[in-house]
Image (cartoon, rainbow, N blue to C red):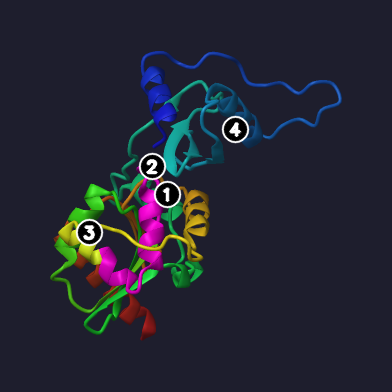
Amino acid sequence: MPMKLTAFLAASLIAAFTGFPAAAQDGEKPKTDIERIKAELQKKIADAPVDTVRRISYGGLYEVIIGGDIFYTDSKAEFLVTGNIIDLKTKENITESRLRQVNMIKWDTLPLERAIKIVRGTGSRKIAIFEDPNCGYCKRLHRDLQGVQDLTMYIFLYPILSPDSMEKSKAIWCSADPGQLWLDHMVKEAAIAGDTKCATPIEQNLALGQSKKIHGTPTIIFENGDRVPGAIPLADLEKKLAEIKVAANATAK
């Protein structure tokens, strides 16, 4: 979550919003409830764009999407609520399910030709990862992944953490074997040096990540479109890959 928004939300837990719903001026087309609530929230949360607002079927609430995160508000946009909504009949975490849907990235929309491809074994299982060469969590993830078999990794160079991240990313892409240099650096802390003048897709990767609201590294994208921010534990990764395979086999029948 963006730092400015985090600070805003911390303050909002102490004091409720002020202000009243916007009224249409003479000659203006009256706003729908959704438009009015979105406009009110945007005035009160100037530091972050309100992506969408929609009425939900529980609690008289409205769902608010801000930067890939889910919040809830009332019909007057006087309060902003954080937290999970749980269906006590089904035990489903509705917020978590919706968050997964909101942040889904369809696998077939990923420009895989702009990623470093690393194949282990048959490579039958696939993940894409947005990574920065200076990312400590990315390095921990790759150390854990060393023993994983039958996996294809598509590494999208996403230099957002440090001033020299861009130069390191360029040198990796321009090297004779980008995949090997990437692994040597991430797993063994090998130094990165070499040409940085070749044509790279890094600027395009940055634009893609920003459009998909990828704010940190690593961010893992699975074949079913699910994304996981952070260095997922190896057991959880294997479980996720197995679930995707089962679901794919069931769909194919």
Instruction: Residue at 15% x, 61% y: name it.
Output: 144
* N-terminal label among 3 and 1: 3
Q: Which residue is mark 2?
A: 163
Instruction: Residue at 45% x, 34% y: name it.
Output: 72
Q: Which residues are magenta?
A: 157-182
Q: Nearer the viewer, residue 68 or 111?
A: 111
Using the rendered image of the protein, determine whether residue 232 is visible from the camera's viewpoint. no
Depth-wise, is mark 4 or mark 3 nearer the camera?
3
Q: Which residue is mark 4?
A: 38
Q: Is residue 76 left or right of residue 217?
A: right
* N-terminal label among 2 and 3: 2
Q: Is residue 66 above or below residue 178?
A: above
Depth-wise, is mark 2 or mark 1 nearer the camera?
2
Q: Which residue is mark 3?
A: 186
Residue 125: in magenta span:
no
Q: Position of residue 139 (x, y in %)?
A: 21, 55
